[in-house]
Image (cartoon, rainbow, N blue to C red):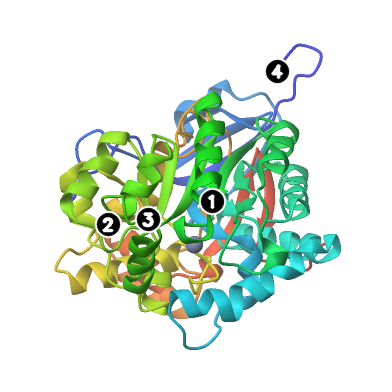
C-alpha cells in the first residue's frame, strides 16, 4: 500500500470464527485459542487483512462509501488447507477395489503417463483448482507427476488465480514405468529457480516414496535440501503393510522405514510424511524431534483399506498431525468430508475428534505445521486474505439441524458431519472472491 496505489478495499461483514492457538482436545476450546465474532467485519486491502473485529468497532475506521459484502447468517473462517494431495489423480478418483501397490500400478502410473502432454496437464490443473476453491480449500501441498510440464502448468494456473500453493515434481528412478522415471535433479533445480518464492508459490521436493527412488536419488534430494532449507519436502511413509515389507527388502541395512528417509537427510521441520499409519512410538518420537508432520488422510486410508491412523499417539509424542485429502486415493477434496472421516476413524479408536480440534487442524494447525502461519491459517490483521464463507443452512436438512444447534460447537460439528461442497457459499483468496456458489455460471 503506497500513496499512489492506495485502494480502499472492501469489507466482509458477518459471523467470524478463527483459531488463534491450539484449542486442545477438550469439549471447550482452551482460553484465548478462539476468535468468535457474532457480527464481525474483515477489512481487506490489497490482498491482506487491514483490520478485523466487531463490526461496531471497525466501522468508524472505514473509508466512506467502501464496498460492503453482507454475509449475515453465514460463517467466515480462514481458507482451508490440504497438506497432501495429488492434482494429477483427479480423474482416477473412485477407481474400484485395490490396495496401495496394485492401485499404483493399475490406475496411478497409467494416468500419470498422460501428463507428458501440456494440454492434458493444463486441463486437469484448472479443473483441480476449480474444485479446490469450490470446497473452500485455498492452499494445498501438491504432488505433480515426474513431467516438468505438469509442475509448470500447475504453478502457472495457481499463480494466475493468486493462490498460495506448494507443489513439486515427483522423483522416481526405479520400480515405475520408464516414461515416469528419471534422475530428476536438473529438472528440479530448474523448477525451483522458476517457481519457488514467486508470488505466493513455494517448491516442495517430492520423492514419491522409498521404493521408487534409488539410494542415489534420495541422496541427491537430501543434498538439495541441505543447500536450500526453506524448501518443503513431501513423500509417503508407512501406509500399507505390503509397502513396509518391500521397503525392508530394498533397504535391509536401515533400522526401519523412517530410517531410510533419515539416512538421506529428508526428515526435517518442513517435511510432510503422508499416512504414517503403521508407526511405533519411537518412530513418532523421532519424527517429532525433527519437527516433521504426518499428513492424516482419512478418506484415503479407508478407501484403500490402509488402516486406522492413531492421532492421539502422535499427539502424545508431540508429533504434528496435518489433515489432508490425498486425492486420488482420497474420495473427496472437501475439508469438511475429511473432518467427517477423521471423526469416524477416531470413533473406531475411541478418540473422537472435536469440531474445535478438527477446524483448528484444517486451518491454523495445518498452516503452523507447514510453516505458513505467518501468511495464512488465521484471520488477523496483516495476514493474507484467504477466507471461506460457510453456509449453515446450505441444504434443507442442514438448515433444520443448524436451527436446533444451541452453540457454536454444535453448529461447527453439524457442518463437519453434514456439510459438503454446497456448504461453501463463497471462497476468497488474496483478497478476491474466487468462488461464489450461487453464481449463474463461471466465465
Ligand atoms: Zn499420496
- State left or right for residue 99 relative to residue 422: left
Where is mark 4, residue-wise? 1
**Quarter of the image containing the C terminus?**
bottom right
- CA–CA distance in space, label 3 to label 4: 54 Å
Question: Relative to 331, is 252 above or below?
Answer: above
Question: Relative to 332, is 378 above or below?
Answer: above
Q: Pick whichever, 112 or 341, lies toward us.
A: 112
Q: Which sits earlier in the primary sequence, circle 4 or circle 1?
A: 4
- CA–CA distance in space, label 4 to label 1: 40 Å
Where is mark 3, residue-wise? 251
Q: Secondary structure at mark 3?
A: loop
**x, y (%) of residue 274?**
41, 56
Judge depth for marks 3 and 4 and give the one in front. 3
- CA–CA distance in space, label 4 to label 2: 38 Å
| Label ID, residue 127 | none
- State left or right for residue 274 relative to residue 315: right
Where is mark 2, residue-wise? 409
Q: Pick whichever, 161 or 64, lies toward us.
A: 161
Q: Quadrant of residue 439?
A: bottom right
Q: Pick whichever, 184 or 94, lies toward us.
A: 184
Q: Quadrant of residue 90?
A: bottom right
Where is mark 1, residue-wise? 207
**x, y (%) of residue 422?**
55, 70
Q: Secondary structure at mark 2?
A: helix
**x, y (%) of residue 153?**
77, 52
Q: Which sits earlier in the primary sequence, circle 3 or circle 1?
A: 1
The answer to whether residue 10 shows anywhere in this view is: yes
Pointers 3 and 4 in contact (CB under 8 A)? no
Amino acid at each position: 500500500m503506497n500513496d499512489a496505489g492506495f485502494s480502499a478495499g472492501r469489507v466482509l461483514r458477518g459471523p467470524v470464527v478463527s483459531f488463534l492457538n491450539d484449542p486442545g482436545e477438550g469439549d471447550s476450546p482452551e482460553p484465548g485459542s478462539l476468535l468468535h465474532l457474532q457480527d464481525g467485519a474483515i477489512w481487506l486491502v490489497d490482498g491482506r487483512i487491514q483490520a478485523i473485529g466487531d463490526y461496531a468497532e471497525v466501522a468508524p475506521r472505514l473509508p466512506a462509501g467502501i464496498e460492503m459484502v453482507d454475509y449475515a447468517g453465514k460463517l467466515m473462517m480462514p481458507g482451508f488447507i490440504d497438506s497432501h494431495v495429488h492434482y494429477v489423480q483427479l480423474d482416477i478418483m473412485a477407481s474400484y477395489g485395490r490396495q496401495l501397490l496394485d492401485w499404483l500400478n493399475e490406475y496411478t502410473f497409467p494416468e500419470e503417463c498422460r501428463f507428458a502432454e501440456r494440454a492434458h496437464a493444463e486441463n486437469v490443473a484448472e479443473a483441480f483448482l476449480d474444485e479446490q476453491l469450490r470446497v473452500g480449500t485455498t492452499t494445498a501441498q501438491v504432488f505433480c507427476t515426474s513431467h516438468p510440464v505438469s509442475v509448470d502448468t500447475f504453478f502457472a494456473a495457481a499463480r494466475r488465480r493468486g493462490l498460495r500453493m506448494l507443489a513439486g515434481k515427483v522423483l522416481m528412478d526405479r520400480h515405475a514405468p520408464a516414461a515416469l522415471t528419471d534422475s530428476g535433479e536438473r529438472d528440479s533445480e530448474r523448477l525451483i529457480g522458476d517457481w519457488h518464492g514467486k508470488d505466493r508459490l513455494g517448491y516442495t521436493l517430492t520423492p514419491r516414496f522409498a521404493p521408487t527412488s534409488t539410494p542415489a536419488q534420495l541422496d541427491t534430494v537430501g543434498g538439495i535440501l541441505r543447500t536450500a532449507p526453506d524448501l518443503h519436502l513431501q513423500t509417503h511413509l508407512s501406509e500399507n503393510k505390503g509397502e513396509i515389507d518391500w521397503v525392508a527388502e530394498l533397504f535391509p541395512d536401515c533400522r526401519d522405514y523412517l530410517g531410510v528417509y533419515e539416512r538421506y537427510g529428508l526428515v526435517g521441520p518442513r517435511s510432510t510424511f503422508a499416512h504414517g499409519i503403521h508407526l511405533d512410538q519411537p518412530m513418532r518420537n523421532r519424527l517429532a524431534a525433527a519437527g516433521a508432520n504426518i499428513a492424516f488422510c482419512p478418506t484415503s486410508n479407508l478407501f484403500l483399506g490402509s488402516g486406522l491412523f492413531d492421532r492421539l499417539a502422535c499427539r502424545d509424542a508431540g508429533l504434528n498431525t496435518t489433515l489432508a485429502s490425498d486425492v486420488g486415493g482420497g474420495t473427496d477434496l472437501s475439508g469438511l468430508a475429511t473432518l467427517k472421516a477423521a471423526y469416524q476413524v477416531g470413533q473406531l479408536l475411541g478418540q473422537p475428534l472435536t469440531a474445535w480440534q478438527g477446524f483448528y487442524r484444517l486451518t491454523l494447525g495445518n498452516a503452523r505445521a507447514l510453516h505458513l502461519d505467518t501468511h495464512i491459517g488465521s484471520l488477523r490483521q496483516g495476514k493474507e486474505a484467504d477466507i471461506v464463507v460457510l453456509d449453515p443452512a446450505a441444504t434443507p436438512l442442514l438448515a433444520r439441524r443448524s436451527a436446533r444447534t444451541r452453540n457454536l460447537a454444535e453448529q461447527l460439528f453439524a457442518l463437519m458431519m453434514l456439510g459438503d461442497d454446497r456448504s461453501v457459499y463463497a471462497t476468497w483468496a488474496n483478497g478476491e472472491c474466487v468462488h461464489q456458489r450461487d453464481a449463474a455460471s463461471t466465465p
